[in-house]
C-alpha cells in the first residue's frame, strides 16, 4: 500500500471517527478557565471585588463555559463554524488578562484599617498563566478542527460525495 492510499484511508476514516483531539483541547481550556475563576474569586480582600465588573465577569464566565462546551461537542462532528467560535473565545481569554487581573494587580484596598494589595505577584502570575493556557488550548482546538474540516471536505469532494 502506498503512502497516498494510507492518507486516503485515514481521510475516509474521518467520516466515522469523532474529532476527539479538538474536543479534549476544549475541555482543557475549560479546566484552565475554571482554575482562573476559582483563583480570582477565592481572594478575600475586603470589598474590592464587590462591583459591577465582577458581575459582568461572572456572567461572561458562564457564557464562556457554555459556548466552549457547546463548541467541544460540535467539533467532534467536524463542524467548521465552531472553529471560528473557538478562535473568538481564545482571543477573549487573552483580552481578559487586561481587565480584572491587571486592574487588581495594581490596586490596593483597606482591610482592618490596613492598606493591602488586592493581588500579589504570585497570584497575578498564576491567573495570567491560567488564562494563557486556556487561550492556547481553545485556539489550538479551533485550528486543529479547521484543518481537519478542510481535509475532510477536500476528501469528500474528491470522492464525489459533496460538490
Image (spheres, rainbow, N blue to C red):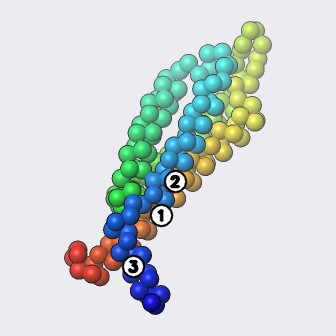
Q: Residue at x 48, y 35 (%)?
A: 61
* Left or right placement of residue 135 versus residue 75 in this view: right
Q: Nearer the viewer, residue 25 or 83?
A: 25
Outermost top residue: 112
Q: Secondary structure at mark 2?
A: helix
Numbered circle sitting on residue 9: 3
Q: Secondary structure at mark 1?
A: helix
Residue 79 visible within the image: yes
Numbered circle sitting on residue 25: 2
* Left or right placement of residue 143 versus residue 149 in this view: right
Distance (Cα) linking label 2 and label 1: 10 Å
Mark 2 or 1 closer to N-term?
2
Q: Nearer the viewer, mark 3 or mark 1?
A: 3
Residue 62's x, y, as percent? 44, 33
Q: Residue at x 41, y 64 (%)?
A: 146
Q: Give the position of the C terminus as an image quadrant.
A: bottom left
Mark 3 or 1 closer to N-term?
3
Question: Crowdedness of circle 1 by 10 Å Cα count: few (<14), some, many (20+)?
Answer: some
Q: Nearer the viewer, residue 64 or 53?
A: 64
Q: Residue at x 42, y 68 (%)?
A: 148
Residue 114's x, y, as percent? 78, 13
* Left or right placement of residue 16 versus residue 113 in this view: left
Residue 109's x, y, as percent? 70, 19
Outermost front residue: 1
Mark 2 vs 1: CB contact within 8 A: yes
Numbered circle sitting on residue 81: none
Image quadrant assignment for residue 157: bottom left
Q: Secondary structure at mark 3?
A: helix
Q: Which residue is mark 1?
A: 144
Amino acid at each position: 500500500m502506498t503512502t497516498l492510499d494510507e492518507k486516503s484511508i485515514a481521510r475516509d476514516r474521518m467520516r466515522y471517527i469523532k474529532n476527539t483531539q479538538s474536543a479534549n483541547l476544549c475541555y482543557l481550556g475549560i479546566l484552565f478557565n475554571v482554575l482562573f475563576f476559582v483563583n480570582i474569586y477565592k481572594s478575600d480582600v475586603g470589598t474590592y471585588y464587590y462591583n459591577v465588573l465582577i458581575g459582568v465577569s461572572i456572567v461572561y464566565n458562564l457564557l464562556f463555559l457554555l459556548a466552549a462546551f457547546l463548541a467541544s461537542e460540535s467539533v467532534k462532528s467536524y463542524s467548521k463554524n465552531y472553529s471560528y467560535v473557538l478562535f473568538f473565545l481564545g482571543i477573549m481569554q487573552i483580552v481578559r488578562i487586561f481587565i480584572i487581573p491587571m486592574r487588581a494587580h495594581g490596586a490596593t484596598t483597606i482591610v482592618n484599617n490596613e492598606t493591602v494589595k488586592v493581588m500579589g505577584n504570585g497570584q497575578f502570575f498564576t491567573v495570567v498563566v491560567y488564562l494563557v493556557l486556556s487561550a492556547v488550548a481553545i485556539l489550538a482546538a479551533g485550528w486543529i478542527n479547521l484543518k481537519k474540516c478542510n481535509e475532510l471536505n477536500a476528501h469528500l469532494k474528491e470522492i464525489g460525495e459533496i460538490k
